[in-house]
Structure formats: C-alpha cells, structure tokens
Image (cartoon, rainbow, N blue to C red):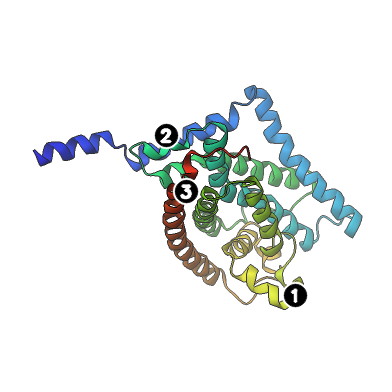
C-alpha cells in the first residue's frame, strides 16, 4: 500500500527538470509575445545598439573617441556584459511581481505540486536568453564598427566558458535573494531591482575600476562576485588588454576562478536561507495573494 501511495505521489509531482522547462517556456512566451515576432526581433537588435550608441557618444564627449584604447575596450566589454547582470538578477523578482500583481497566478503556483524556487529560476531564463542575444549584438557592433580587438582565435574559450557559467549561477542565486525580498514588500517593489542594478553598476567595476572609489567603499565591490566575473570576462575575450585593466592585477586567472567559485557556494547557501525565511514571512502575512497595484 505504501509503495502504491508513494508511486502516485511521484507521478502527481512533476520533476524539477519538467518544472524548470515548463516555467522557462512560460517566461519566453511572456517575454516575446507582446508583439509580432518580426517587431520583437528588430527591437532585440536595436535596443542593445542604442545602448552602445549612448556609451559611444559619452566617450566621444569625455575622452575624444579613441576607441582602440584599453580604457574604452574594457569599458565597452564591461557595459556589454552588465546587460546580462541586470537580466539575471532582476529576472526572478520581476517574475514574482508579474505573476503576483499582473497575472495573479502566484497563489496557484504556491499550491501546485512543484518546487517554487525551481519555477522562479526557470521563469527568469527567457530574460537571460534575450540578454545573451543583446550581449552578442553589442559585441558584434563593437567589432564591426569600432574595430574592437576581440579576435576569436585569441579568445581564451575555456576561461570564458568556465567563468561565464559560474557567473550565471551566482547571479541566479543573487536573483533568488532579491526575489525573496520582493515577496515581503507590499509597495514599490519594482524599484527594488532597479535600485540594486544602479548600485551594482557603480560597485562592480563595469564602468570604472574600483580604485577610483573612496577606500571605505571598495570593500563593497570586493564583496560582489560580479567584480571578479567581469574581470575574468575581460581577460578571456581580450587577454592582453583585459589584463592591464586596474582591477585584481595581483590575482591570476585561476585565483579569480576559485574566488568566484567560493562566492557561488556562499551566495547559494545565503539564497537558500533567505528564501526559506522570507517565504515563511510572506505566507504568514498573506503576501502571496496580495495585489498592491505596484
């Protein structure tokens, strides 16, 4: 009898992979179905190019437009990959707000026989995929029109793949932490992700090295895995230029990878603890079925 009941429970509860795959498909439908596929494709191309154009104009005004300089190359790569940072970290929180406030389906997700964190992470995959496409468009634009020195035969592909994957994982954990906080916020929750994104842009070394910050604030950037991730991305795509960027020049690629892996474990444990605590609070307060009209 117990074996039969266990079998029925297993059949009723979908696997983590199935939950992840289904929520990723749902996220993609929501991300892309707001307009005609052709318009969506054009928008996905124009948006990152427009962002790159703003950066180019600012650099022309401030520095005179020497696009071959190491400073601009590192700045451009940092800004390109920061698109992915915002999408990965804010994807979970925006998914929670969408499901709770707009579609009003979060309460049904909570009573469904699935693991909610798996659903939430899968829900953010679509925004990550769109961000990856934006990064490719931005880099391609830089290589073709600005003669960015990214040579495929000189790229350290092993370093790039390893650091890129670790970065996605740790940013997923950071997104789950932010999403957990979103669960207990009643009003103006949308601004939380945007505020965090602005802070990360300053303290991650995406636009300038941490050395320009006041000494008491540098520890913030050193406590962020994104700082080490962007350094690894720069070193892997442009090995010579990336290494002269004045961030962690005393650390080897292997040391940076180990630090990033350590941060991944730490942030993973923190994400699990924070989600468990805030999920409990949200259930107690009735926030799962709450509509705040933003």
Which residue sits at x=65%, y=60%? Answer: 234
Discs 2, 3 touching: Cβ within 8 Å = no
In the image, residue 46 sits, relative to residue 211, either above or below, namely: above
Per the image, the residue denoted by label 2 is 108
Q: Quadrant of residue 50?
A: top right
Residue extending furthest front? 285
Q: CA distance from mark 2 to mark 1?
A: 48 Å
What residue is pinned by disc 1? 214
Q: Quadrant of the C terminus?
A: top right
From the viewer's side, name the closer residue of 18 and 234. 18
In the rendered image of this protein, does residue 267 appear above or below residue 186?
below
**Label 2 Cα neighbours within 10 Å, binned few <14 / some 14-19 / many ≥20:** few
Between marks 2 and 3 in the image, the one whose residue lies nearer the viewer: 3
Q: What is the x, y in percent for residue 21?
A: 42, 36
Secondary structure of the residue carrying tag 2 is helix
3D distance between C-alphas at marks 2 and 3 = 17 Å
Question: Residue shown at 78%/62% (left/top)?
Answer: 71
Report helix, strand or loop for mark 1.
loop
Give residue 221's position: percent from left, percent from top: 64, 68
Residue 158 appears left or right of 198: left
Question: In this view, which residue lies farthest toward the top?
Answer: 36
Checking the image for residue 285, the label placed there is 3
Q: Is residue 149 visible?
A: no
In front: mark 3 or mark 1?
3
């Amino acid at each position: 009898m117990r074996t039969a009941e266990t079998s029925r429970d297993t059949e009723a509860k979908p696997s983590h992979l199935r939950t992840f795959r289904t929520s990723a498909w749902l996220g993609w439908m929501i991300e892309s179905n707001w307009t005609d596929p052709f318009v969506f494709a054009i928008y996905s191309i124009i948006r990152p190019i427009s962002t790159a154009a703003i950066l180019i104009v600012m650099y022309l005004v401030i520095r005179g437009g020497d696009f071959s300089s190491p400073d601009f190359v590192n700045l451009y790569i940092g800004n390109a990959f920061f698109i992915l940072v915002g999408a990965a970290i804010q994807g979970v929180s925006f998914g929670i707000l969408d499901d709770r406030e707009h579609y009003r389906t979060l309460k049904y997700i909570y009573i469904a026989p699935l693991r909610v964190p798996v659903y939430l992470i899968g829900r953010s995959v679509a925004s990550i995929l769109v961000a990856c496409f934006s990064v490719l468009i931005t880099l391609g634009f830089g290589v073709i029109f600005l003669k960015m020195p990214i040579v495929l035969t000189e790229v350290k592909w092993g370093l790039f793949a390893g650091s890129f994957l670790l970065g996605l994982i740790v940013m997923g954990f950071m997104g789950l932490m932010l999403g957990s906080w979103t669960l207990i916020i009643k009003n103006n929750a949308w601004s939380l992700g945007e505020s965090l994104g602005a802070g990360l842009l300053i303290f991650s070394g995406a636009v300038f090295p941490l050395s320009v910050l006041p000494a008491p604030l540098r520890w913030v950037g050193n406590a962020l895995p994104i700082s080490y991730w962007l350094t690894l991305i720069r070193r892997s795509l442009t090995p010579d230029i990336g290494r002269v960027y004045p961030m962690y020049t005393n650390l080897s690629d292997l040391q940076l990878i180990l630090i990033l892996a350590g941060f991944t474990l730490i942030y993973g444990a923190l994400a699990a603890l924070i989600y468990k605590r805030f999920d409990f609070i949200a259930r107690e307060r009735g926030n799962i079925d709450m509509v705040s009209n933003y």
